[in-house]
Image (tube, helix red, strand yellow):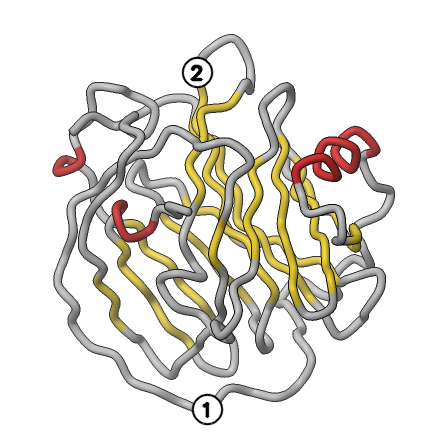
């Protein structure tokens, strides 16, 4: 199967370095993105540990309050893509795009926007309170990030407990760390987002076969630490 197939498939594998973590989310892109595929690997080991109960304190210091000033164009684009009953509470940006966070009660939505591309929306799912393969999964979208084709990868959510770092190592060798931002409406809510825009290499090459790519490695470090190796098929949001 080629890299830009609208379908995805594979088998999950995970291993723990220390402790446990757990979050939840399902996703609903505004428009069905192009999706990649990746071959699987075997589960090796998982151990559990208690979740800490203190407020999140990322290793690089305090999280920005709401991420202001906000990008008004992103707010407008996401307002049209996210359920109208939700309210924007934070924004976080990288060099290419902006991720906007919205809430309604205890439900949340993350909306990622790059240039003239359609917003991609990730929404929370009831009954998924911790980090697992579903909550860590990615949206994969072909975006307008310059003259050449680019692929945008986004994972985001509401932290269920403190972490110092969440990082993703992609099959092309790039490692991206999460950004954190607190809700402007509720200082107890901290959102995270990992975003990566590939402009060259195997993740962009339409001739790349799934079996040629390594799983994505995800590291979560806090009071406990855990690492996941997630094949592309399991890592892709499909809703």
Disc 2 designates what residue?
A: 149
On the image, the x and y values in percent for residue 174 come to 39, 40
On the image, the x and y values in percent for residue 130 come to 48, 74
**Side (left or right) of 84 relative to 23:** right
Please give the name of the residue rendered at 46% of the width and 11% of the height, measured from the top-left corner: 148
Residue 10, above or below 72: below
Disc 1 designates what residue?
A: 50
Residue 77, above or below 199: below
Q: Is residue 96 visible?
A: no
In space, the residues marked 1 and 2 are separated at their CA atoms by 44 Å
User: Observer-nearest residue: 175 or 54?
Assistant: 54
Residue 136, above or below 236: below
| N-term-proximal mark, 1 vs 2 | 1
On the image, the x and y values in percent for residue 120 come to 56, 37
Residue reaching furthest bottom?
50
Residue 26, above or below 210: below
Please give the name of the residue rendered at 58% of the width and 78% of the height, measured from the top-left corner: 161
User: Observer-nearest residue: 223 or 3?
Assistant: 3
Please give the name of the residue rendered at 63% of the width and 33% of the height, measured from the top-left corner: 113
Q: Is residue 86 visible?
A: yes
- At mark 2, the secondary structure is loop
Q: Which class describes the residues within 10 Å of circle 2: few (<14), some (14-19), or many (20+)? A: some
User: Observer-nearest residue: 159 or 166?
Assistant: 159
Please give the name of the residue rendered at 35% of the width and 81% of the height, measured from the top-left corner: 18
- At mark 1, the secondary structure is loop
On the image, the x and y values in percent for residue 110 come to 62, 49
């Amino acid at each position: 199967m080629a890299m830009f197939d609208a379908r995805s498939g594979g088998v999950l594998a995970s291993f723990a370095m220390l402790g446990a973590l757990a979050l939840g989310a399902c996703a609903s892109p505004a428009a069905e993105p192009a999706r990649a595929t990746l071959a699987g690997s075997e589960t090796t080991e998982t151990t559990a540990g208690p979740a800490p109960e203190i407020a999140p304190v990322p290793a690089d210091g305090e999280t920005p309050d709401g991420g202001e000033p906000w990008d008004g164009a992103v707010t407008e684009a996401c307002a049209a893509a996210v359920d109208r009953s939700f309210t924007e509470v934070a924004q976080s940006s990288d060099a290419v795009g902006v991720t906007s966070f919205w809430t309604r009660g205890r439900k949340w939505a993350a909306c990622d926007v790059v240039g003239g591309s359609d917003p991609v929306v990730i929404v929370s799912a009831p009954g998924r309170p911790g980090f697992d393969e579903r909550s860590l999964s990615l949206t994969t979208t072909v975006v307008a990030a310059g003259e050449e084709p680019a692929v945008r990868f986004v994972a985001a959510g509401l932290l269920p407990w403190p972490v110092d770092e969440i990082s993703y190592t992609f099959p092309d060798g790039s490692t991206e760390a999460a950004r954190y931002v607190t809700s402007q409406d509720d200082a107890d809510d901290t959102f995270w987002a990992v975003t990566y825009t590939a402009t060259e290499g195997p993740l962009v090459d339409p001739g790349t076969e799934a079996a040629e790519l390594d799983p994505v490695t995800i590291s979560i470090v806090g009071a406990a630490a855990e690492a996941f190796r997630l094949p592309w098929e399991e890592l892709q949001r499909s809703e």
